[in-house]
Image (tube, rainbow, N blue to C red):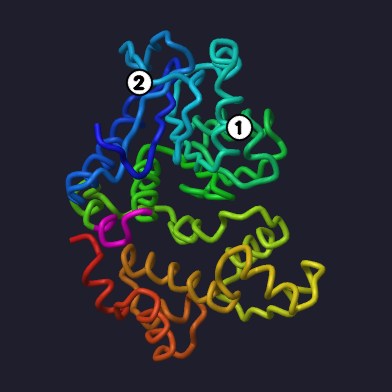
C-alpha cells in the first residue's frame, strides 16, 4: 500500500461495539475515494497479538498491536460493553499506549465509554470531557478530577475528543475530516452519509476545538468562560484581570496559544453559534444575529461572510438539511 498522510489507529478491546468503529473507517475511505489520493490509512490495533471478542460475539484480529512502536496521528477509542475494572485486568497495556501516543502528538478521540480509557491514562485530568449519561456517575466517582459535561454531545480539550453516543461519534469523524480536508468535504459527506444531520445538541463549541490544541491552562479557563458568555458584552481587560495578567500579556498569550487575537476568536465563536442555528432552527436570521451577540445586523452579516465566505442566507440555503 502506498504511504498515506494521516495514520489512524482504531483501538479494539474486549466487548468493543463494532458499530462505533466501522462507520468512522467508512467515512475515511469515502474521503480517500473522493480525493483520489491516500489521505488516510488506518489500523485495527489490539492490546496484544491475541484476537478480541466484540460485543456482538465476533472475533476481531488486529493489524497491529499496542506493543508495537508505531506512532499514529489519531487514535479512536470505540464504545465497549462490560465492567471497566475487568477490562483493566484483561488489557493493562492500553493506558500506557495511550500516554505514549498522546505524548507523541496524536489526537485521542473516544466514543461513549471509550472515555474510560482516556481517563485511566490520566489524559483527561483537569480537563473537560463527556460520555453517555449512564456512564457519567461511574466516571465522576472513578475520575473526579475531570469536568464531566453531561449535556454536551461532543467535547474537545487540548487534543482530547470525547463524544456521548453513536450519532456524536459520527459527528466526531466528520469533524476530524473537516480538520484535514476542509468544511466543503465534510459537508458533502454529511449530506450523503448522515441523512439525519440535525442534532439536539449544539456543535458550536466542538467546532471551535481547533483553537484548544495548546497547554496554556489560563487561556483554557478564559476560553471556557467565553464558551458560556460569548453572546454578552465582553471586556478583554476584565478577562485579563481575572486571569491574573496585564491586558498586553493576556493578548499576547491568547494569540500565541490559539493562533487568533481574542477579538477574532470571539467573532469566530459567535459565527459558529449562528451557523448551528441557521442549520438546525427556523429562527429569523436577524433574531439569530441578536442571540449570538450582534445588535447590528449588517455588521453581523459582514463578519459572517468574512469567516465563511457566504452570507448567512446563502449559508442556510447551502447547508440546511433538505
Q: Relative to 238, is 261 on the left or the right?
A: left
**Which residue was labeled with disc 2?**
63
Does 185 lie within the magenta span? yes
Q: Is residue 223 above or below residue 166?
A: below
Q: Residue at x 64, y 79 (%)?
A: 234
Residue 63: percent from the left, percent from the top?
Answer: 35, 20
Secondary structure under badge 1?
helix
Badge 1 crowding class, 10 Å Cα cut-off, few under 14, some 14 to 19, many 20 or more, is some
Q: Quadrant of the N terminus?
A: top left
- Residue drawn at 49 percent across, 21 percent down: 66
Which residue is tagged 1?
99
Give the image quarter of residue 277.
Answer: bottom left
Q: Is residue 287 above or below residue 165?
A: below
Indicate left or right for 80 with 127 as reference.
left
In the displayed orientation, state which residue is furthest to the top.
Answer: 50
Q: Is residue 173 magenta?
A: no
Residue 55 position in % (x across, y down): 37, 17
Is residue 309 or residue 206 the one in the foreground?
309
Return the residue found at the far right: 244
Query: Which of the 4 image quarters holds residue 237?
Result: bottom right
Q: Secondary structure at mark 2?
A: loop
At 59% across and 11% down in the image, what residue appears? 89
> What residue is shown at x 72% (from left), y 39% (from top)?
145
Residue 311, x across and y down, in percent: 30, 81
Mark 2 Cα shell of 10 Å, populated few (<14), some (14-19), many (≥20) = few
Q: Which residues are magenta?
A: 180-187
Distance in Å between CA atoms under marks 1 and 2: 20 Å
Quarter containing the C terminus: bottom left
Mark 2 or mark 1, which is nearer the start of the sequence?
Answer: 2
Residue 285 appears at what percent x and percent y? 35, 79
**Location of residue 320 by image quarter:** bottom left
Amino acid at each position: 500500500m502506498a504511504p498515506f498522510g494521516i495514520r489512524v489507529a482504531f483501538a479494539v478491546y474486549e466487548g468493543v461495539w463494532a458499530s462505533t468503529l466501522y462507520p468512522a473507517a467508512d467515512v475515511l475511505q469515502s474521503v480517500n475515494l473522493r480525493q483520489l489520493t491516500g489521505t488516510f490509512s488506518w489500523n485495527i490495533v489490539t492490546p496484544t497479538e491475541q484476537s478480541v471478542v466484540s460485543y456482538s460475539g465476533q472475533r476481531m484480529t488486529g493489524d497491529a498491536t499496542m506493543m508495537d512502536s508505531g506512532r499514529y496521528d489519531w487514535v479512536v477509542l470505540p464504545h465497549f460493553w462490560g465492567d471497566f475494572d475487568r477490562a483493566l485486568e484483561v488489557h493493562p497495556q492500553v493506558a500506557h499506549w495511550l500516554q505514549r501516543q498522546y505524548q507523541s502528538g496524536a489526537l485521542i478521540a473516544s466514543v461513549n465509554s471509550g472515555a474510560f480509557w482516556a481517563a485511566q491514562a490520566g489524559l483527561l485530568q483537569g480537563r473537560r470531557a463527556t460520555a453517555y449519561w449512564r456512564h457519567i456517575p461511574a466516571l465522576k466517582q472513578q475520575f473526579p478530577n475531570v469536568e464531566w459535561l453531561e449535556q454536551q454531545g461532543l467535547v474537545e480539550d487540548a487534543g482530547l475528543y470525547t463524544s456521548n453516543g453513536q450519532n456524536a461519534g459520527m459527528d466526531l469523524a466528520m469533524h476530524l475530516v473537516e480538520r484535514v480536508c476542509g468544511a466543503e468535504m465534510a459537508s458533502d459527506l454529511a449530506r450523503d452519509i448522515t441523512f439525519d444531520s440535525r442534532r439536539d445538541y449544539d456543535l458550536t463549541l466542538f467546532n471551535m476545538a481547533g483553537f484548544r490544541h495548546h497547554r496554556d491552562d489560563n487561556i483554557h479557563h478564559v476560553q471556557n468562560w467565553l464558551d458560556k458568555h460569548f453572546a454578552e458584552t465582553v471586556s478583554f481587560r476584565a478577562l485579563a484581570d481575572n486571569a491574573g495578567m496585564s491586558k498586553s500579556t493576556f493578548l499576547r498569550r491568547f494569540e500565541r496559544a490559539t493562533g487568533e487575537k481574542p477579538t477574532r476568536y470571539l467573532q469566530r465563536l459567535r459565527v459558529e453559534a449562528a451557523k448551528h442555528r441557521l442549520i438546525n432552527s427556523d429562527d429569523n436570521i436577524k433574531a439569530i444575529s441578536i442571540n449570538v451577540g450582534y445588535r447590528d445586523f449588517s455588521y453581523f452579516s459582514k463578519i459572517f461572510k468574512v469567516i465563511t465566505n457566504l452570507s448567512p442566507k446563502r449559508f442556510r440555503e447551502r447547508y440546511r438539511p433538505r
